[in-house]
Amino acid sequence: MNCAICSKTATAYNKLKQPVCSAHTKQTAKSPLCPDCGLAMSVRQGKWGAFWGCIAFPSCNGIRKI
Ligand SMILES: [Zn+2]
Ligand SMILES: [Zn+2]
């Protein structure tokens, strides 16, 4: 699992439940907009680590790299 702000290994969660490294526990990653539908995105954990997933998932499959 990777930090939502940098790409280091996440060891904790911030107040928005985003995975973060020890240096970023007081920060929150700014949500980008979905490239497909323009809605906000939230941090999800996949097989290959954390990524931004559209909040409209599963009706929208928009993703972005963190
Ligand atoms: Zn970090
Ligand atoms: Zn979307």
Image: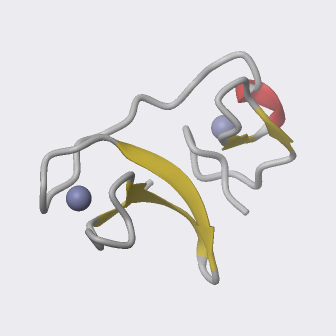
Q: Quadrant of the C terminus?
A: bottom left
Give residue 25's quadrant in the image: top right
Q: Is residue 49 above or below residue 51?
A: below
Note whether 53 is above or below 42 in the view shown: below
Where is residue 51 drawn, in percent x and y? 49, 61
Q: Could you tell me which residue is drawn at 72 percent across and 23 percent down?
A: 15
Does 1 sit left or right of 49 as displayed? Answer: right
Question: Where's ligand 2: which quadrant?
Answer: bottom left
Q: Is residue 30 left or right of residue 9?
A: left
Determine the image quadrant of residue 5.
top right
Left or right: where 37 falls relative to 8 = left
Looking at the image, which residue sits at the far bottom? 47
Pinpoint residue 24: horizontal percent, then vertical percent: 70, 27
Q: Quadrant of residue 32?
A: top left
Residue drawn at x 67%, y 57% as measured from the top left? 2
- Foreground: 6 or 66? 66
Instruction: Name the residue located 87 percent from the left edge and 46 percent from the top edge.
Output: 11
x and y percent of residue 12 in the render? Answer: 85, 40
Total count of labels: 0
| Placement of the N terminus among the 4 image quadrants | bottom right
How far across and down, in percent of the image, does residue 40 sit? 30, 40
Which is more toward the observer, 16 or 10? 16
Q: How is the image coloured?
A: secondary structure
Residue farthest to the front, as pictured: 59
Residue at screen point 69% across, 51% down: 8
List the single residue furthest toward the top.
26
